[in-house]
Amino acid sequence: LDGVSPKLVKKAADARGPAIMALADVGDFEDARTLLAMGADVVSLRGADLEFVQWLAGAMTEYDSLSGWCNAPKHICAGGDLRGLAFCCPPVKSCAVFGALKRAGLTPEEYVNRKIAAARGTPLEKGEGTCFGSLVWCCKIGKPCYLRDEALARADLSEREYMELKKKLAEKILPKIH
Ligand code: SF4
Ligand code: SF4
């Protein structure tokens, strides 16, 4: 990618400031997805022709409706921005979640309480048989896991619906600064 680095976008996104526009030479779908998945709100398509812009906008819309969260972050321990807390476990072992919570301005207790409160009354509360007994603590759909997939099937939730719920969860648990 020519222009801003995805890591820099993540750093800016984690600061939870105003919306971020990533200026880079976006040449294809993957370039745009990488920047959005690191927390950019907007990507600039400088120099792109109208046909490419229309194609990319259509591809992004389609990907969003198929995936449920087109700019879903990576797991925190894989370098994702703070929205990745939606896929984190409870803070029970020493791992990257503690650093992320510090950056988010949340204590471990606040994080647990916010997640439980945000999931209350939603299908994410279910999840018998998963590592922590609730889908609220479960990993991103791209991480293969038969325990989660069985819980999703029992809750009659599609992969897309699961990711949509995780997106809402991320919005609810992160403190709003802007
Ligand atoms: S809580 Fe789980 S997903 Fe989150 S950083 Fe730690 S090991 Fe990774
Ligand atoms: S059950 Fe699977 S998806 Fe859920 S937390 Fe455990 S490993 Fe992750």
Image: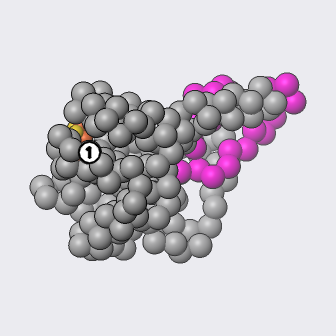
> Which residue is located at x 81 percent, y 30 percent?
54
Disc 1 residue crowd, few under 14, some 14–19, many 20+, Cα 10 Å: many
Residue type at mark 1 is Gly
Residue 121 x/y as whole percent: 40, 60
Q: Considering only vertical position in the picture, is 34 above or below 52?
A: below
| Closer to us: 110 or 149 | 149
Q: Would residue 38 be found to the left or right of residue 61 on screen? A: left
Residue 31: x %, y % from top left: 59, 32
169 on left or right of 34 = left
Under tag 1, what secondary structure?
Answer: loop
* Quarter in which the N terminus is drawn: top right
Vertical placement of 128 versus 82: above or below? above
Residue 26 visible at all: no
Q: In this view, does 116 lie to the left or right of 8?
A: left
Measuring 27% from the left and 62% from the top, which residue is drawn there? Answer: 99
Which quadrant, please, contains the C terminus?
bottom right
Count of marks overlaid on the render? 1
Q: Where is residue 170 in the image (x, y as percent from the top left)?
A: 45, 57
The verdict on residue 86 being magenta is: no
Q: Mark 1 points at which residue?
A: 127
Whether the residue carrying mark 1 lies under 8 Å from ligand 2 is answered with: yes
Q: Residue at position x 34%, y 32% from top? A: 153
> Which range of residues does the magenta coloring cover?
27-52
Quadrant of res 85: bottom left
